[in-house]
Amino acid sequence: MKKNRAVFATLILGASLLAAFPKRLGGQAGALPSHDLSALEEAFSSYSKDFRALEAPLHGDELQEVEFLDEVATTAEDRLHAANAMLEMYKNISCKPDREKVKPIVKEQFNYYSWQMGNEADRSAGSLQFAKLPAIAQMGLKMKDDLRAAKSKLDEIAASLK
């Protein structure tokens, strides 16, 4: 729990610093390929909005399924947002020794987020047995595929950290 709070506090501080000082610090230009996660983040935001829009007329297992899928989408969006902020902070570390100290932490977080995306893809697939409406099942399957794509993207980024 304390580790999560520390990571969250670091992300908030980093995001604030990026907002205040958006100019890239020197010395690392071109050090990493662009790994923008905002398109995936937006996709999960859209899933969440779509699932919430479907909730009103539902009840019972069907409502619980849509609420579960909405929660998965929201959590994936949050994780991708945090990963994007972490990556931006990492890219802006210009001191090589500091960058080397931070790299294992960033890689560990990306590996954790990747594992979570895979886990949520499996949980989502298993939960779709309760989806009676074709629209919910179809959206759930597409989201499962996007969770797997997000996992692959996070794995790719973790492997590319220099």
Image: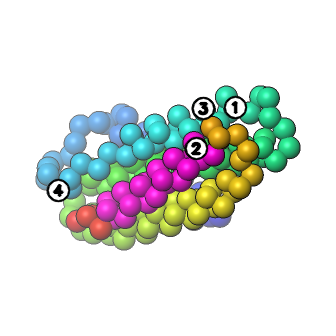
Q: Residue 64 carries which label?
A: none
Q: Give the range drawn in magenta.
A: 137-158
Q: Can residue 109 be seen in this view?
A: no
Q: Name which residue lies at 84% across and 38% down.
A: 59
Residue under numbered circle 3:
49
Q: Magenta region, mostly helix, strand or loop?
A: helix
Residue under numbered circle 2:
138
Three-letter code for the amino acid on which mark 4 is drawn: Ala
Quadrant for the N terminus in the image: bottom right
Element under disc 3: helix
Three-letter code for the amino acid on which mark 2 is drawn: Gln
Q: Disc 1 and disc 3: Cα gap in Å?
A: 9 Å
Q: Is residue 110 left or right of residue 157?
A: right
- Decide which of tag 2 and tag 4 comes sooner along the chain: 4
Foreground tag (3 vs 2): 2
Q: Disc 4 and disc 1: Cα gap in Å?
A: 44 Å
Whether tag 1 and tag 3 are in contact, CB under 8 A, the answer is no
Residue under numbered circle 1:
54
Element under disc 1: helix
Element under disc 4: loop
Three-letter code for the amino acid on which mark 3 is drawn: Lys
Three-letter code for the amino acid on which mark 1 is drawn: Leu
Spot occupied by residue 31 in the image (x, y as percentages of width and height) = 17, 56
Foreground tag (4 vs 3): 3
Residue 21 on the magenta span:
no
Foreground tag (2 vs 1): 2
The color scheme shown is rainbow
